[in-house]
Amino acid sequence: MKANIHPNWYPEATVTCACGNTFVTGSTLPAIRVEICSSCHPFFTGQQKFVDTLGQVDRFIKKTETSKVKQEERKRILEARKSKVEEKKKERPSLKDLLLQARKQVSS
């Protein structure tokens, strides 16, 4: 093996979790900071927990709320359009109705 090309190995690297848990392992870094570990991960603890580091859960909830509002608004717009189309259909008689009226006028 070539000399001086491999990273330094720290057999007692300290891993620190955001929950406060620390443990020692081997690594190429002397100290490692993690957001989640086996003592706070939902798979190991059996508890449901949201890990929100950048406000992603809040942003997602905000997006779903705004999408619900937009869906309701879109639904109202579509209903208004539908009612306008129905009104136009009622106002204008069909060709069949016009022909029947013309026959009645000719026969009378």
Image (tube, grey):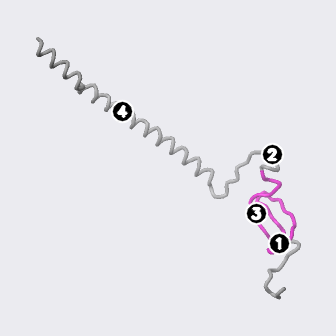
Residue 65, position as x, y percentages in the image? 54, 43
Give me the residue at 83% from left, 54% from top.
39
Say if 85 sits above or below 38 in the image.
Answer: above
- Hey, what amino acid is under mark 3? Val
Answer left or right for 27 relative to 67.
right
Going from the N terminus, do you reach mark 4 or mark 1 first?
1
C-alpha gap between disc 1 and disc 2? 29 Å
The label shown at residue 86 is none
Going from the N terminus, do you reach mark 3 or mark 2 first?
3
Going from the N terminus, do you reach mark 1 or mark 3 first?
1
SS class of the residue under badge 3?
A: strand
C-alpha gap between disc 1 and disc 3? 14 Å
Occupied quadrant, residue 15:
bottom right
Few, some or many C-alpha atoms within 10 Å of disc 4 (few <14, some 14-19, many ≥20)?
few
Give me the residue at 46% from left, 43% from top.
70
C-alpha gap between disc 3 and disc 2? 20 Å
- Hey, what amino acid is under mark 1? Ser
- Hey, what amino acid is under mark 4? Lys
Few, some or many C-alpha atoms within 10 Å of disc 1 (few <14, some 14-19, many ≥20)?
some
Residue to which mark 4 is pinned: 82
C-alpha gap between disc 3 and disc 4? 55 Å
